[in-house]
Image (spheres, grey):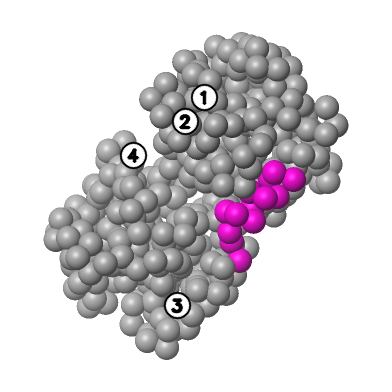
Amino acid sequence: MRVAIDIRKWHDYGIGTYVRNLVRELARLDDTTEYFLLCRKPDLKQVKSLGSNFTGLVQSSSNYSVAEQISIPTSLWQKEATLFHTPHYVLPLLTPCRSIVTIHDCIHLKFPQYLPNRIAYAYAWANLWTATHKAQKVITVSEFSKKDIVRYFDIPEDKITVIPNAIDERFKIAPSENEMVRLRDRYQLPKRFVMYAGNIKPHKNIERLIDAFALIHKRGLDDVGLLISGSEVSKYSKLRRAVHRYGLHKHVRFLGYQTESSLAVLYRLASVFVIPSLYEGFGLSPLEALASETPVVASNVSSLPEVLGNAAIFVNPYEADMIADGIVTALEDSDVITDLKEKGRIRVNRFSWNQSVKKVKEIYQEVGAEH
């Protein structure tokens, strides 16, 4: 069987995490199947390190462009691929082999304002419709996302398989004391701080998190800092204005994109991790925080209750005072903190890239056998 996988989003935060772990785990599990990875030229070295059964196919076409509708099918045809797995919603109409698509969420349909124009929205909708109907199988990461996909695209439920994301095992291992001290000094972090990590788009509800943080300071917890880590902070000046409106500029730090190794240290240093998001297809960062034995405060909407189970404090994300209540509890109530850490250790063991990728490989074999 000759399996092609689109890994052009290798360096992205969300889908990139999925792609990297999918491919690395396949390399550990399978040294016989021939894999062709559609990648960017700088990533050829990464592909070569995976094993002799992995070959990189350089793609110059941009993501979500008309050019990829031709270049991807051409590469698949030239390599006589048996099966094509696209880890996001682009499945070209001219794809010449059987296919599997992973759809993580329906974010572009829920929040069309994130797309640059109506043409981009139409392109996203057309690609999602094509992918869900043309592919032999659809993989998604939560029951919540599965329901969204069925509702939007009217496909049979049995065509969709839920295979959850998982975390890198490094988050379960405590960093050295030297690493902790070095990163705390580097960013001049206070002894206690609340942390958020992820992208900074409006549905992540970060402005309301800043509102909640202001309420915490009004309640007398003025020794607590707020750390916001995300690669697109500069695009949302509204967040910095909110910080200055409350006079909190000395207490709030905005960091850019962080490597997995840096995140592993930051999670351990944080007193509380907060994800006040209004919409999540899965929510990987709070799981990483749980693995790092950090209490989590999360929205009680979308996939987060499904993923986090009983291991987090859930709050109404539309009410800043309720977010603040959850954070204060996670900061001050020692019994709750101990309970959350224990439940978190149990919860994260339910998620494994090894087990998830084994299920993906079973789908490869099922769909490929029908070739």
Instruction: Establish if 64 lies above or below 111.
Output: above
Magenta stretch, main secondary structure, is helix
Magenta segment boundaries in residue numbering? 350-362
Mark 3, other Cα within 10 Å: few <14 / some 14–19 / many ≥20: many
Q: Residue 9 placed where, x, y %? A: 48, 32
Q: Earlier in the sequence, mark 3 or mark 1?
A: 1
Measuring 37% from the left and 51% from the top, which residue is drawn there?
A: 260
- Which amino acid type is marked by label 3? Lys
To which residue does mark 2 refer?
48
- Which amino acid type is marked by label 2? Lys
Q: Closer to the camera: disc 4 or disc 3?
A: 3
| In this picture, residue 64 sits left or right of residue 46 | right
In the rendered image, the quadrant that contains the N terminus is top right
Closer to us: 106 or 364: 364
Residue 341 visible, this orientation = yes
Measuring 43% from the left and 66% from the top, which residue is drawn there?
A: 172
Q: Earlier in the sequence, mark 4 or mark 1?
A: 1
Instruction: Establish if 196 lies above or below 3.
Output: below
Contact check, label 4 and label 2, Cβ < 8 Å = no
To which residue does mark 3 refer?
341
Q: Residue 36 placed where, x, y %? A: 59, 26
Measuring 62% from the left and 39% from the top, which residue is drawn there?
A: 31
Measuring 38% from the left and 25% from the top, which residue is drawn there?
A: 42
